[in-house]
Amino acid sequence: MYCIIILVIIIIAICLYNNKNNLITTKGDGILIYHNYIYHWEVLGAIFDYCNKYGIIPDLYTTKEDENDWLDIYRNIYQYNHIDKIEKRYKYVIVPTLRFNKISNLGDNIIYFVHRHKWIRKNSNPNVKYVHFMNKERLIPTIPLITYKIAKPIIVLIGRQDKSTVRRLKLIQNLGDFMIISINRKSNSKELNNIVDKHYTNLDAKEMIDICANSSYITWLTEYNGIQSGCVNMAFSTGCQLLTTPSYKRDFNLVSPIVIDKQSVIIPIQPDLRLVYMERDRIIADRDRLFTHLINLT
């Protein structure tokens, strides 16, 4: 009898220990993700991915319409509560893409993710934090959407492109071996249209992911000037090797991207997906360490 009691106590202790080490629980009323911008819904995925990994089910409040149906993707992967009205105060309020609203009364700690330094506001409140994507953290909000694929010879251009993109694409000696697809919100320039085989405007998230899931490369060849682009997140999330500038690869301390700058290059028909997936694992681990430091949920 005593042996049975001792065994039950041991089992309970093991369960409690595992829960303590596998789940991070918030004090107070948890986490609110407050998305008040029409674009950059891809950033939400990184927060959902982190929260669910540590047993957190956050609340999500949105002020804009999800025009590209990103939430249709997320609700099939992650657990979160999409609320219509904020009725309580939260321990943490995370604003994935900065647009200022009167949200200081919603939580004890406010975390803003910003894409430009000029969006950072001076304040003396230690409970308000700004995380710039280009600061020392070099945050790339990535999720493991695609873990295996047989890539087709396709290069995808996502988002706004400038003249430097066209110049660098012309340095690829075997560009004719690839189909070039552009995806953005507006029409391309005439010069870019001479290179692109297919152009899509305002695709929904699933259609864009499907294209990238079958592609080899995604480009970020513009002079980024301290601006983070969603195409970088998409490249790592969908297992595409990034074609980028030397400054971007250097500043983000990346290994897997292929640099295109001033000299002619030949791009392998098959991307180095092993290298891409290895680097994605490291990026996600860095993301998790940063989030844990920021929201301090121990």
Image (cartoon, rainbow, N blue to C red):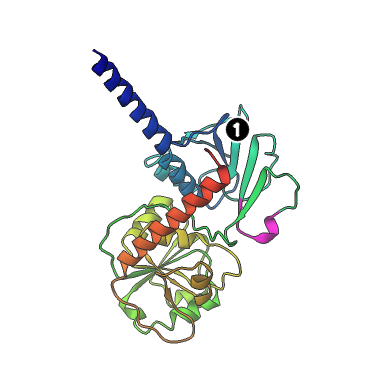
Density class for disc 1 (Cα within 10 Å; few <14, some 14-19, many ≥20) is many
Identify which residue is drawn at 55% across, 59% down.
137
Instruction: Determine the residue positioned at 34% across, 61% down.
Output: 277
Query: Residue 205, image x and y in percent?
Result: 42, 51
Query: Can you identify the residue that label 1 sits on?
Result: 90
Residue 243 image offset from top left, x and y in percent: 43, 72
Q: Quadrant of residue 155?
A: bottom left
- Percent of width and height locating residue 16: 39, 28
- Residue 9 seen in the current view: yes
User: In this picture, is 148 found above or below 167?
Assistant: above
Q: In this view of the protein, which residue sits in the foreground, 166 or 5?
A: 5
> 146 or 281: nearer the eye?
281
Q: Is residue 252 above or below residue 208?
A: below
Q: Is residue 77 magenta?
A: no
Specify start and end residues of the magenta stretch as a single range. 113-120
- Residue lying at 62% horizontally and 45% vertically, measured from the top left: 111
Counting every numbered tag in the picture gives 1
Residue 117 in magenta?
A: yes
Residue that appears at 54% across and 70% down: 251
The answer, for residue 142, to whether it is visible in the render is no
Amino acid type at image mark 1: Tyr
In the image, residue 223 lies at what x, y percent?
A: 56, 73
Q: Residue furthest front?
A: 2
State the quadrant of the N terminus. Answer: top left
Judge left or right: residue 211 versus residue 250.
left
Considering the numbered disc 1 on the image, is that residue within a helix, a strand or a loop?
Answer: strand
Q: Is residue 288 left or right of residue 270?
A: right
Front residue of 246/100: it is 246
Task: Look at the picture and state if 53 lies above or below 265.
Answer: above
Pick out the residue farthest to the bottom. 263
